[in-house]
Amino acid sequence: MVHFCGLLTLQREPVPLKSISVSVNIYEFVAGVSATLNYENEEKVPLEAFFVFPMDEDSAVYSFEALVDGKKIVAELQDKMKARTNYEKAISQGHQAFLLEGDSSSRDVFSCNVGNLQPGSKAAVTLKYVQELPLEADGALRFVLPAVLNPRYQFSGSSKDSCLNVKTPIVPVEDLPYTLSMVATIDSQHGIEKVQSNCPLSPTEYLGEDKTSAQVSLAAGHKFDRDVELLIYYSEVHTPSVVLEMGMPNMKPGHLMGDPSAMVSFYPNIPEDQPSNTCGEFIFLMDRSGSMQSPMSSQDTSQLRIQAAKETLILLLKSLPIGCYFNIYGFGSSYEACFPESVKYTQQTMEEALGRVKLMQADLGGTEILAPLQNIYRGPSIPGHPLQLFVFTDGEVTDTFSVIKEVRINRQKHRCFSFGIGEGTSTSLIKGIARASGGTSEFITGKDRMQSKALRTLKRSLQPVVEDVSLSWHLPPGLSAKMLSPEQTVIFRGQRLIIYAQLTGRMPAAETTGEVCLKYTLQGKTFEDKVTFPLQPKPDVNLTIHRLAAKSLLQTKDMGLRETPASDKKDALNLSLESGVISSFTAFIAINKELNKPVQGPLAHRDIPRPILLGASAPLKIKCQSGFRKALHSDCPPSASQPRGELMCYKAKTFQMGDYSLCGLISHKDQHSPGFGENHLVQLIYHQNANGSWDLNEDLAKVLGMSLEEIMAAHPAELVDSSGWATILAVIWLHSNGKDLKCEWELLERKAVAWMRAHAGSTMPSVVKAAITFLKSSVDPAIFAF
């Protein structure tokens, strides 16, 4: 039995990282974050510590500094190759050095090197970043502090330069040897209604009677078993705004950081319309790698990812409009398609697809998404049916930039809607493929339902296309706006639109205003949103708007070391160096030249351990008391019965602090039924026909909780046939028993009601009245919109 005392690695070495403290300042929908990593060398030899950690894809990292034994050392942003060379040179000369760089294959993974940390020495390394906060469907702003970094699936063509290739130690969350603390301050002129979190928080403390400022703290003891998420609700509906920020005082005009920058936010009031009846080719690309056998969240009772995926596909299939085309792909180390090419949506094709979905398992090995994407894009386009691609994955891949590049190349022929499943999903992959194609991205964590988010996105994709999007500025003579954000070609209902611009020329006298106008066309009608703003830039020592603008521009040019076109590499490097925002081509380096102690022999190397989520796909070697050893490691050679890259997921019956014996392993596969059990809502939806109707049979009777004889006896045969009667009963049952999940069945219910109107005609009001009476329901007959 292996015992551990204090902060030790698996090799019984002290862990130099002791704690992580985070300060978050949120103003309206922008967050400024300062994260400090506190190190201490308790050994008798100088150390080099290496730490890999996750970061949101949209984070603009602009500052890196170290406080070593009371001395502050500010890092410089340099060309990455130069920074690495200078780091190695500094270490070899006996100096202390600190290196911060992003991964070469993804924008959401960073590594920090602390070199030549002397015995007994303490170092606090602080990085700062800013980011926009996404807007949720219920109006909340979502801030996420990533705490989980899942292993990324390694395939044969993976970059050898990735920091993800470094096999850092991984330990269960209960034994992680460092702590996390976080304090968040929130300010909004609109007033703060409430703050919610997926983690225990201190009670919200309002810093004024008007509730425009509040503070919350992460409760002690966070176990790194989930990302830290804050949902912030403001008291008023979000309104269009323009924020002007002064440039750097010592920077010449004409440069990004020297001129004022503007951040414009619009909330276009796009009217809701009935979904198109026939248009569209819908392809659903579902992750079936071994990690999809994990639970949706770290909670033991949460649904397995593959089970949620199956239910989601059933809902999507039932909600598709008659006359469209569709196909389903499953992918892992290989991929499978339901049909050789997309087929027309009919009762026959829907039933065939449903049969395949019911048998679907997380059995395709690793996570290689590029090959199925290429196969989909090679397929012929269907005239009059634009391609809408829905991608579901836990995002654990290493070829992120290659995937984004492939989507971007094919952006003219489709829109991609992406869904990140579970904790630790790659934000770089999920956001990147959606951004590259004009789609949207969603993240499904904690208690989120994949079903709800997928159906909301399908509804969005069925809305008429917003066209002729344009932005115009009305500014005083001598002043002009240079767009920094990519051209906006797609707008969705309920979406916030953020645009960055650089104001060049002579700023006018005080009290002068400008105006910016968003114009777009929807079904032949022209809509305009305008906002007037004072032309008085405000100073910000952190240059928040400038950094965010630079990040927005970098995301259009920076596709990693291997995938960025040569024409964009120089621009991305220069923009990164000018703005101070890190990129794939730059790194922060800080050197303490006052320390000049030549190292006798190589530095002792210490990799900082990362947490493993039991039941998730992560490398772990476990030794039981019996001596049995089970290796769950993405780079372990597979057995004959286990395809390469497939990760078997287990839950421990017993796991004791300080004791790494894990006995009584139970496979999740044995704990959950592959069917839909007692979920009557899923059962009811499963039996709906492609045209929206239901058949009157024992399956429907079971869901309604009645005998088939009772239902048939109450059937008003003189008014409607048996299918019409069954459909009315099914719709009323949905409204009576599934109100909380209406967003998941709203589209298929619309299809059912439309079928009923065409089928029952003038007798529909009488049939509805009879059905409500029979079911003893209080549902309002108006739901059928006679």
Image: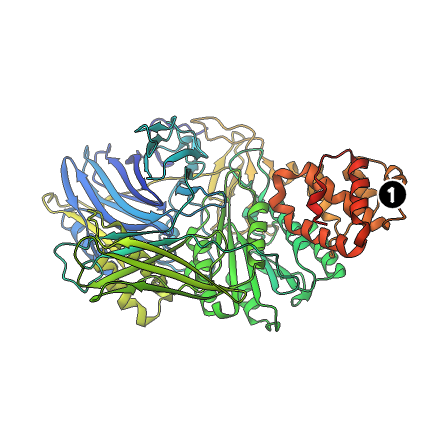
Is residue 333 visible to the viewer in this orientation of the structure? Answer: no
Determine the secondary structure under disc 1: loop
What's the coloring here?
A: rainbow
- 495 lies above or below 604: below
State the residue at coordinates (75%, 48%): 687
- 108 lies above or below 378: above
Residue position for label 1:
715
Return the x and y of residue 44 as percentages of the image width and height: 21, 34
Return the x and y of residue 770 as percentages of the image width and height: 82, 40
Q: Amino acid at mark 1?
A: His
State the residue at coordinates (79%, 36%): 775
Q: Determine which quarter of the picture holds residue 293.
A: top right
**Quick one: 578 or 158, which is closer to the camera?**
578
Q: Is residue 615 left or right of residue 157?
A: right
Q: How many marks?
A: 1
Return the x and y of residue 720 as percentages of the image width and height: 85, 50
Q: Is residue 650 left or right of residue 774?
A: left
Decide: few, some or many residues near mark 1? Use Cα within 10 Å; few <14, some 14-19, many ≥20.
Answer: many
Is residue 78 visible to the viewer in this orientation of the structure? Answer: yes
**Quick one: 763 or 376, which is closer to the camera?**
763
Q: Determine which quarter of the picture holds residue 550.
A: bottom left
Return the x and y of residue 566 as percentages of the image width and height: 32, 71
Q: Residue furthest front?
A: 511
Q: Is residue 119 left or right of residue 709?
A: left
Q: Determine which quarter of the picture holds residue 149.
A: top left
